[in-house]
Amino acid sequence: MLPRIGITVGDPAGIGSEITAKLMTYEQITDLCTPIIIGDAKVVQQGLDIIKSNVRFDVIDDLECRLEPGTHYVYDLDNISLSDFSFGEVSAEAGKAAGEFIETAITLAKEKKIDAIVTNPINKESFTLGGYGKKFAGHTEMLATLTGTKNYCMMLVSGNLRVCHVTTHVSLIDALTKYITTERIVQVIQLANDACKKLGIKKPLIGVAGINPHAGEHGRFGDEEQRIILPALEQARELGVKTEGPVPADTLFSKGKGGWYDAVVAMYHDQGHIPVKLEGFIYDHNKQNWSMRGINVTLGLPIIRTSVDHGTAFGKAGKGIADYNSLLEALKFAVNLVRGRK
């Protein structure tokens, strides 16, 4: 049986409905999975209208019914009116709807009614106005809280480059002084190793970044590598994980992109995000547009979640010009993780 992949529409005022519609036109999608779009059917149809597509879908409100191969399904929450939002504008109603899409998807995944979740982007200001931001900083925190997960991390993927983050949305000072610990590094190394195995890599090699220039050069430029990172590598090796490091960050990611490492561990947000987005976000100045293929994966959850690695792109919303390749790559990655789990 094909995996059931739940695809949340994201913020209705952003590009989520458009790129979801473009994903629906991808000819091989129903060969890869049974796509179940979780959102409002009116918003999904609006996305199809934007790209002038006549792709059909069946509306459902539960997953007890028989799902036919080759069919697109919309799990309709019917929770927002098209008059409640405008493309490219912050909206409490849109933020509330987006939060409900995610919450429903998590429930369906926990109940094993879908095999994985692929998420479209949300706008954090709208998310907060809609009542969700007071409880959750964003997608990842919402997923972790609602699944009762304590040890998790973000992995960004573009091509061969798989980057797992020790810290993300904290200040650089706090990352360096509070959150980059030996214990946390060991957790992320293990999460990276497990993810690689689920992708069919039998004996992954995990490269671990240093913090300082030249990875500290034996204490000349800082001793965090010796005090914090080396003990983590030793513990990971004792647990049976193949690791290498700490590696200077200016060479680590090139080696990861080239396939030297199966995954790499970055210590803080920009250290990991910049190389992935340089690899996966390509701007064509002549065409005045972006091609995006990087994706975001949340490791450590009891459910599978992948996501686009870009925002709601309010400036493009409703215009029919948004690139859907990141969403397509997130879908394919989710399918591979489902197959690896089984």
Image (tube, grey):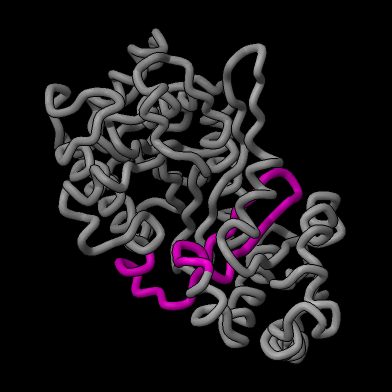
Pick the front one: 16 or 55: 16
Pick the front one: 136 or 36: 136
Pick the front one: 314 or 318: 314
Image quarter in which the C terminus is found: bottom right
Q: Give, as a single range, the part of the protein colored magenta.
A: 144-172
Residue 242 visible, this angle: no
Q: Is residue 111 above or below residue 7?
A: below
Left or right of residue 202, residue 293 in this image: left
Coordinates of residue 206 in the picture (x, y in percent)? 76, 69
Quick check: is 146 in the magenta stretch? yes
Instruction: Count all numbered tags in the image, as a single digit.
Output: 0
Q: Is residue 28 above or below residue 321?
A: below
Residue 319 visible, this angle: yes
At horizontal 49% and vertical 40% (from top left) the residue drawn is: 310
Pick the front one: 262 or 318: 318
Looking at the rendering, which quadrant does residue 155 occupy? bottom right
Left or right of residue 35, residue 14 in this image: left
Coordinates of residue 67 in the picture (x, y in percent)? 37, 37
Looking at the rendering, which quadrant does residue 283 occupy? top right
At horizontal 41% and vertical 59% (from top left) the residue drawn is: 140
Quick check: is 112 in the magenta stretch? no
Coordinates of residue 79 in the picture (x, y in percent)? 14, 37
